[in-house]
Amino acid sequence: MYPMLVNSRNLFFGAAIVLGLVASGPVHSFDDGAEVTIDYRQGLMRALGGNMAATAAIVVDGAPFRDNLSTHTRYIADATVDIPALFPEGSDFGETDALPSVWEDVEKYAELSRESHEAAVALHEAVEQGDDAEIMAGFRTLGQSCRSCHEDFRRRD
Ligand code: HEC
């Protein structure tokens, strides 16, 4: 009998912990999936930022990690393949810096996403071909494409 009691007590505490977590969550009725979606896309965006910074250190400042360059540009090309998919309906409030325009001006958002992805693919190809002038030009075009989207679709600090 005793082990049974321990088990049901663990179950009780388990349930209490789960309820506690739910109770301390956001006040508005917030689809659970939206919060993790926002966490995920912000993490992905930070990874884009990190890979851009690493790329800049190599191609602009000459950091001696040229062998890693294609790892960074491949990530950027892969991760930008469908940015709008990271912004589903219902993920427009809570801890997000995405502006309402993301869900209002869907076509422009998709277009800027596509431009960024194309710039990233072009940069990655230039890296694969080892063409320094193309790499520098591609890096600048890509950086500009990130900024263009943030200007219209991300809240400024
Ligand atoms: C099509 C639009 C779009 C493009 C292109 C885009 N971003 Fe973003 N980015 C956003 C939006 C919207 C947010 C805010 C997301 C949120 O807070 O939910 C964001 C957030 C960020 C953040 C902050 C993440 C955080 O910690 O909250 C960084 C860093 C970032 N982007 C880097 C980049 C880089 C680097 C590129 C280009 C390689 C890029 N982004 C391309 C729309 C875009």
Image (cartoon, rainbow, N blue to C red):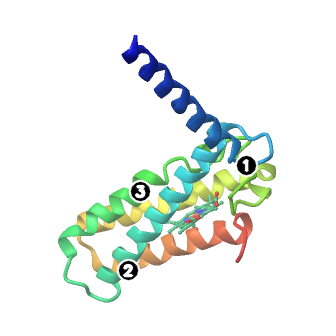
Residue drawn at the location 26% of the way across and 87% of the way down: 62
- The residue under label 2 is which amino acid type? Ala
Residue drawn at the location 23% of the way across and 71% of the way down: 130
SS state under label 2 = helix
Question: x%, y% of residue 142?
Answer: 49, 70
SS state under label 3 = helix
SS state under label 1 = loop
- In the rendered image, which residue does mark 1 sit on? 26
Residue drawn at the location 29% of the way across and 80% of the way down: 58
- The tag on residue 56 is 2
- In the rendered image, which residue does mark 3 sit on? 77
Asked if the beta carbon under badge 1 is closer than 8 A to the nearest atom of ligand 1, the reply is no
Question: x%, y% of residue 70?
Answer: 27, 64
What's the distance in space between the residues labelled 1 and 3, CA to CA?
34 Å
Whichever of callouts 2 and 1 sits on the residue coming sooner in the sequence is: 1
What's the distance in space between the residues labelled 2 and 3, CA to CA?
15 Å
Asked if the beta carbon under badge 3 is closer than 8 A to the nearest atom of ligand 1, the reply is no
Looking at the picture, does residue 110 appear above or below residue 20?
below
Question: x%, y% of residue 77?
Answer: 41, 56
Q: Nearer the viewer, residue 133 or 5?
A: 5
- The residue under label 1 is which amino acid type? Pro
